[in-house]
Amino acid sequence: MKDLTDIPALMHDMGRRARDAAAVLAYAAPEAKRRALEAAADAVEAQAPEILAANAQDLDYGREKGLSDAMMDRLTLSPERIADIAIGLRTVAAQDDPVGAVMDEWDRPSGLHIRRVRTPLGVVGVIYESRPNVTADAGALCLKSGNAVILRGGSESFHSSRAIHACLVEGLRAVGLPEDAIQLVPTRDRAAVSEMLTMTDTIDVIVPRGGKGLVGLVQREARVPVFAHLEGIVHIYIDREADPLKALEVVKNAKTRRTGICGAAECLLIHRDVVDTIGQGVIRALIEAGVEVRTDETLSKIVGTVPASEDDWGREYLDMIIAARVVDDIDSAIAHIRRYGSNHTDCILTEDDAAADRFFQRLDSAILMRNASTQFADGGEFGMGAEIGIATGKMHARGPVGAEQLTSFKYLVTGDGTVR
């Protein structure tokens, strides 16, 4: 029985075992990884009642802590969401294995043949909050990319994450891969997070997935490299050439489908020329859907809106609230997004190709969209099966981080007695 009170010793041991497992995964057969993920998916389906029971414990804990409705939605599992977890595992299983894939190859006049091939990062540490499905997503993507992973789920999802993790371990066991390839920190003690951030000898990269407080802490204190996004301050700009029906449907879906995800729209920018037409229609539809719309002075004449304060610009609500303001033109919209955005996901609604091109060229968010709901800012919707997070930095990985993004590369150089 591990001593869960000696956090440094516990984490050191997990790191050592993860490093050993990573050495095996680096050359594991693609077929073995595929079968492990399929077996894990089978286990998730078979153990759905146990996962739901564990989730019920977490929901009780969340209610006691007074979690918001959006956070409770993130935490909640249902038969449908458990089925989606299994589907996600099978989708990742079916993808091409990235490890060893040749990215480029060429010959040199010296007689050398050079290949650049994908290789695992090694050991990934994932620190996340209330969404228990991240346990499956992160475990699957790390395994597919040949990485060992140490998962530290949030205290709210403690029981759910353990139940899902048990299914992943069952998949590893079924094909003879090291069970230490996917480890879950077995304590709610926050000292485990601090320890992970300094484990430079055994963890190669940290991926934080959660709110501003968690990600900010990781970015400030980590000595291990970090793939992170700080916030999902997502903007939608309604251009003067927007289609009214598309605007109505896209904005409503982007805000209300699931308010607690990082791709949910948080700020609406409306071209001055369409304030009294498309703008009014969209805002009224949001209010009718139960959204609190916080507006600038121009839009405040719309019945049911609430005056916005300066704090409402650049704010991630993760709730049924959206900020809205009028802009004079597309360049004003771009300037607003540059000032208040978080480089996560931003969208333009327009039928004008030139306007869309200008929006795409002059903004540098990880994901830019045209005439599509920002709720699609998700690795599964990008065809990655799942994602370990949305990276907004500019080093190594940007946007949805799937299996391919969890690899680095190495050069394989061959000669024939070639000397310099």
Image (tube, rainbow, N blue to C red):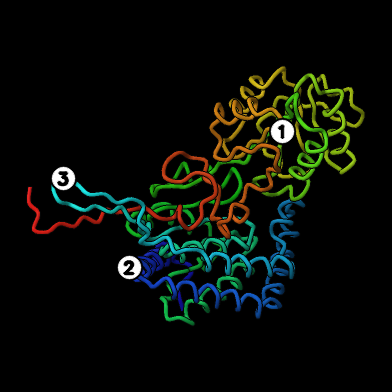
Give the residue drawn at x 58%, y 65%: 91
Q: Which residue is mark 2?
A: 23
- Residue 109, label in figure: 3
Asked whether 420 or 329 is in front, the reply is 420
Q: Is 352 placed left or right of 281 in the picture?
A: left
Frontmost of labels 1 and 2 is 1
Label 1 – label 2 distance at C-alpha: 48 Å
Q: Position of residue 99 (x, y in %)?
A: 39, 62
Residue 272 percent coordinates (x, y) = 78, 19
What's the amino acid at mark 2? Ala
**Label 1: which secondary element:** strand
Q: Is residue 357 visible?
A: yes
Most distant residue in the right direction? 303
Residue at the spot 74% in from the left edge and 29% down from the top edge: 238
Residue 321 spot, x, y in % from top left: 78, 39
User: Which of the 4 image quarters holds residue 351?
Assistant: top right
**Residue at position x 53%, y 68% in the image:** 94
Q: Mark 1 — residue?
A: 349
Badge 3 amino acid: Pro
Element under disc 2: helix
Q: Position of residue 322 (x, y in %)?
A: 76, 36
Above or below: residue 320 compared with residue 97: above
Which class describes the residues within 10 Å of circle 2: few (<14), some (14-19), or many (20+)? some
